[in-house]
Structures are given as structure tokens and as C-alpha cells.
Amino acid sequence: MAKPTVPIQALAQQYGPHLNYAPAGGWRAESTHPYSLTKTHCCFCGQQCGIQLKVHDNQVIGFEPWEEFPFNRGMLCPKGVKRYLQNNHPDRLLDPLLRSEQGFRKATWDETLDFTARRLREIQERYGKDAVAVYGGASLSTEKSYLVGKFARVGLGTRHVDYNGRLCMVSAGHAYKPAFGVDRSPMPWSDIPKAQVLLIIGANIGECAPITTDYVWRCRDNGGKLIIADPRITPIARNADLYLPVRPGTDLALLMGLLHVVLRDGLENRQFISEHTSGFEAVAEAVQPYNPQKVAEMTGVPPQSIEKAAHWFGEAERAIALHARGIEHQSKGVENCAAVINLCLATGNIGREGAGCAMITGQGNGQGGREHGQKCDQLPGQRSIDDPEARRHVASVWGIPVEEMPQKGLTAVEIMEAIHRGEIKGLLSLCFNPLVSLPDANFTREALEKLEFFGVIDFFLSETAQFADVVLAGSLQEEEEGLGCSAEGRVIHIRKAVDPPGNARQDCNILCDLARRLGKGKYFPYESTAEILDELREASRGGIADYYGITYDKVDRQMGVFWPCPTLDHPGTPRLMEGGRSFHPDGKCRFMVTEWRESGDPVAKDFPIYLTTGRVVSQYLSGTQTRRIGELVDQYPDPRVEIHPRMATAHGINEGDWVTVTTRRSEITVQAMVVKTIRPDTVFIPYHWPGERSANRLTHRTLDPHSKIPEYKVSACRIRKADGPPQWWLTRSVNGAQPPVLQANAKERR
């Protein structure tokens, strides 16, 4: 039978209005309340900027800059400045919720945890252990990430555990690991100002990693040249020395073309290649056909610009390439990242001060969150789950027979596909909003409706959580101690500032309590996150991501510790591959052959326009947090579509007109932003909104065959001027906020 509708309006009366929360009075940085300061870190992107939270009466009431922290030196972006406002937000879940015939109702912890354990056990007894899957989140602390992986594999015995970092960093990791033997940016950000040439490709730094712009400007101040490759003239590109307007999905051709010119004109570092690499000849042969004229036809970048960029990078004594989701969110994302690495290896730009390549981690703990076991193919310490010795080591730390260690499971998107096929019947999810963040949102909604049991641990009722059978009220970042790891590989200390409000509980306590109800309590005896860290340190010991020498006290004293850090007296490793030596047994870095292929959703006569998606500075990921902070909502309240004036004129579209964007899957209607800062054959829509405003209704589920990351950055679409505003606009509340959802979608029970 269909599940009953959920009276979200009743929850609104209990917790307050949704969205546009901007508390008045003293809840600002200039508050006169007596307060204490807690040195911690921003809860949003992978830069993990240092911040001091003001705490009064177990509430975060504001912030002060933490000028001593070396990464951001007190600087914060708009999200960082306002991040404290969610702590006391009226939407905050204060009690666990259980679905009843009348909808969600408040329930006790005993009732909800008993129910969750019973339903998980029933499904596994009926269909097998792998009929249940677990989703984690890349914004969880490193200890929570470790616990999620252990809970799935030991508490439930399922092989299916993955996390929303699958939508972010995995293409880079799948390129760096075979190239260098390690999945981490090889250099600290302090190297960036020392580069003579800086190539930034597929990275909207000004909006997605704002504090990194300071490092870029210091590079420019030191005389460095800036090359930007992107389909849009992003804020950072407006001051570039050279802009390469690459067509969406053709970055690989551009990178192979750059290497072609480097090799053609003898700009490679033959000594470095000979002494520190393998596989060069095969890559040299692979790029031979990619001459500037051919690449120009494929990418839309003028051949003279390709020549200039290659010479600047190849002739520099110190050059750095930075990349992010623009090249990673593609069905050839791994090859794109490998091509960046090939360019740096060929020119000898690895393992030296001011020289290297780096992935710009997108999510809060995107680096630490994938190192210790919530990723389907890895065990703690960045060990491969397919490695027999790794399995033996971790099994011994966990105290289980090695034969009970599950094998590799499905990735995040594949889990949703398995739910659709009826192979996975139950799902437990922590801090993941797949209905907004996964591609082809209608497909995701259909999968959620098919689940026999769905449990969510979160601190807000996300769009996905409205499909749940039980919602367990969890903790914000500042409500539980733990570690994180930033984009540059710096392990940082997230200090506990306040307790969870009401009857909400810390996430680690929820998982451990649930494990006890599943009869696995002896494997989860922790009384604190410090005890979890101690076990994590041992589980990672001897691995690639070795945390054994990292403690809270050491992180505090050093203001961060770069892993690997194998002993307590080890200082950490800010720059990997020092002197060109990789983490492979032979010490050599590996060139990787890359092959061109088309996007999984090619443009055609009926869908002739490229659609690409991304972030805006005031919003974060699925918007579960930032869409509830009014001053951030005001900066960019709804998604808009960026259109070049030439395309706008061809379709009779003016600034502010309503435009319907249609792909092979669905359509949405949003307002037009007519801008000159985008290619004339491309439109751009940010993806932070749900429902009829969701850009991921339009994207497709084509995956990179290696990393299984979706191809968010390249879709084919068509556009037309709409007759008028869409329904979601007409039903807005008076103050301009999206009204609360009045009912959860019906969900079929089997």
C-alpha cells in the first residue's frame, strides 16, 4: 500500500518556518553576550578554513577570525561567515521521527533504534546480507567515516557501502593512485605562490574554493602567469593571462594537445622522465595525432592559444596544474586527470617546491572521508579491499575472522540502480541527499519509492529524508569531536563546541547503539571519538594513508599534520614525491595512456546545446544547509540559466525571461541570465536546489568506467522561451522563500 503523506506543516509548527533563517538581535559576530571561543574549522568545502566559534549557553552565537591558522589566516568566504547560523535553526531535528499512518511523528530513541535494527535484520534474514546498503557522507569527520565503513562491514556484514564523495573526488583518486601510488594532492598550498606558471583547468576557484584565490593572486604578485581553461569565464578567469574557452567534455583533447606541443618542441624534461618515470613512450605515441589544429577543431580553443599555453608551461622552471570537478565530472574523468599528471611528469613538475599538480577537494572532508573505509573499494589507511594482506590486517584490528570481511561492493550510483532492480531492499544513509545530488533525479525518486526500509541519520529533514521510514536526529560538525583532512592533505582538528540540542544525538553514538541492537556491540565499545581514533590509527598503520602518528594534541600543536605520519615523532609529509620518488615499490611515477571518447549524452540535431552544471559561491552541494541560511539564500535564491547573448537572441530570450531547458530525461524552467562569460554553444545551471528547480533532473547516469563518477558536466539539451513562470514560482510564499513541502511523495510497500 502507499505510504501515508507526511504532515511537514506540523513539523514546521514544531520547529519553526523553513528557509530564510536569519536570527535577529545578538546572534551575530558582534554579539555582546558573554561567550567562549572554540577554535575549529568551517563545515563546508574541502579547504576546511580555520574559524573560532562563539559559544554562549550551549549555543553557537557567532564567530571570530582565527588569524593564526596558516591556511586561511582569518579569511572566510560568504558561507564560512554565515555557517554558524544553522546551529540553532528552527528546522533542526530535535527528536527521532517515525513514520505512522498519519505521517512522521516524534518517537523515542529506544523505539526508533529498535525499529531500525529489526527492519534491517528482517530484510537480511529474508534476502541476504547484501540486500542492505549503507550511504555515508564526505562531510563526516574522519572518525565517523571510519565508523560507517566498519558498521556496514561488521555491524551489518554487507559489502555495499559507499559515500557521496563518489560524486566528487574519485576520478582524481583513480588517476593519482596508479600514477603515484597515493590518492592525495602531492603538494601543500604554500607551493602555489612559488610557481612561475599556474594552469587551472575545470576549477571555478573564485566560487568553489574562494580562499585559494589568495594563493593564486600571490602567485601573480610574484610574477607568475595564470592560464585558465573552462567553458565559462569564471571570476578567476577574468584576470587570467591566457583564457582557453574549452568546449564541455573536450578537456582531454586539450590536455593531450598541450603535451603534443611540449614533446614536438622539445620542452620535456628528459632527465626527470628517465630517472623517475615509466610508460613515457606509450603516452608520447598516444598524443602524437593531437596537433593544435585538430585539437582546436575538437575543443573550440584557438590553435595559437594551445601553442602559447604549452610553451608557457613547458618552459617554466616551476609550473603547477590545479583541477577540480570540471574535468572530473565526466565519463572520461579519470583520463582527464591522468592527462594533467602526464603533462606535469613530462615537464618534471612533481616533488619540487612550486611545481606539481593538485586536485581541489570539493567536500568538507572529501579527502579524509575516503581514506579509512566508507568507500566501497577501500579499507582504512587507503588500503585496497582486494588486497589479501590489507584484509588480514584490518580484520585483526577489528577482531573478526578474515573470511567474514565482505568483498568490494557497489558504488553510490550503482547502489541506486540495484535498488531500482530490486536487488537492494534496505538502505541506511548518513548526511547524503541523493534525491538532489545524484543524476537523473526522477530515477532516484523511483528507487527510493521501491525500498522496503529506508533509514536516515541527519540534522535537517532533507528532501531525501522525506521518503524515510525513520529519521534519526543526528549532529552538526561542531557537536562532536573529530579529525578532517583538507584539500592540501593537512589533517585538522574539529573541536566539539556544543552539545546536540533537544533529544538529538551524536552520529557516532547512534551507530554504536544501533550496532548493539544488531548483536554486534562488542565490536563497537567506544566511549569517545578519541577511542575511535586510536583504533583508526592502528587500522591505518603501515598503509598509504598512515595516521598512526597523528593525535589530537599533535594536530593542535602543529596546526595540522600532513599524512603519511607513521610515528608519533614524525613531523608529517606536506610535499609528497619529494625528489621525484613515488609511493610505488620501484619509486617511479607512472605515465598513463589516455584515449579520447565522446560524452555519454552527445549533442545532436534535436539536442544541439551543451549543458554544464556547477556551484555558486553562496550555496553548497545539495543546499540542505545553505538553503536554510537567509542571507545566503538572498545572494542566489533560485537556480538560473546562463546563456550567451548570441544564443539568447537566436531564441528570443532577454534577461530575466523564463526559459525551459530540456534534455533526454526531463525539463525544468528557470530564469535567464544573459552573460558574455559563457561559450555561445553552452548553458550553465547550478545544482543546489530540489524538485522542479533541480538541475539533476536534467543530467544523465553515464559513469566513468573506472571511478563510477557521473557525467554531470556534459549533457545535451535544447532551450525555448517559456510562456510564463513555472508552478514552483507561482506557489512561492510571500517573502520569496520556497514554501514547505506539504506532503512526502507516496512510497510503495511490498
Image (tube, helix red, strand yellow):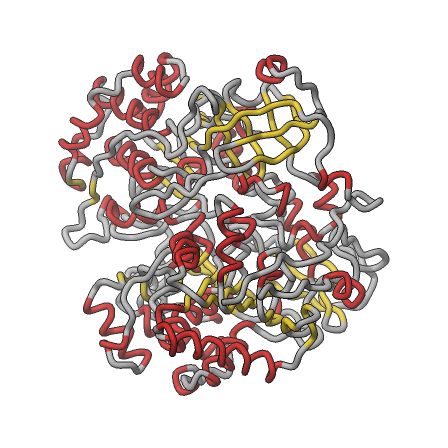
Looking at this view, is 490 or 354 the one in front?
Answer: 490
The answer to whether 87 appears left or right of 199 in the picture is: right
In the displayed structure, would residue 31 be above or below residue 480?
above
How many numbered discs, if any? 0
Could one spot residue 537 in this view of the protein?
no
The answer to whether 563 appears left or right of 464 in the picture is: left
Residue 419 figure quarter: bottom left
In the displayed structure, would residue 135 be above or below residue 165?
below
Residue drawn at x 35%, y 13% as measured from the top left: 303
The answer to whether 740 appears left or right of 338 in the picture is: right
Query: Residue 57 at what x, y percent from top left?
Result: 76, 73
Residue drawn at x 52%, y 49% as measured from the top left: 437
Residue 653 figure quarter: top right
Residue drawn at x 58%, y 74% as measured from the top left: 506
In the displayed structure, would residue 650 be above or below residue 461?
above
Query: Residue 306 at what x, y percent from top left?
Result: 36, 18
In the displayed structure, would residue 78 be above or below residue 395?
above
Could one spot residue 533 in this view of the protein?
yes
Residue 561 figure quarter: bottom left
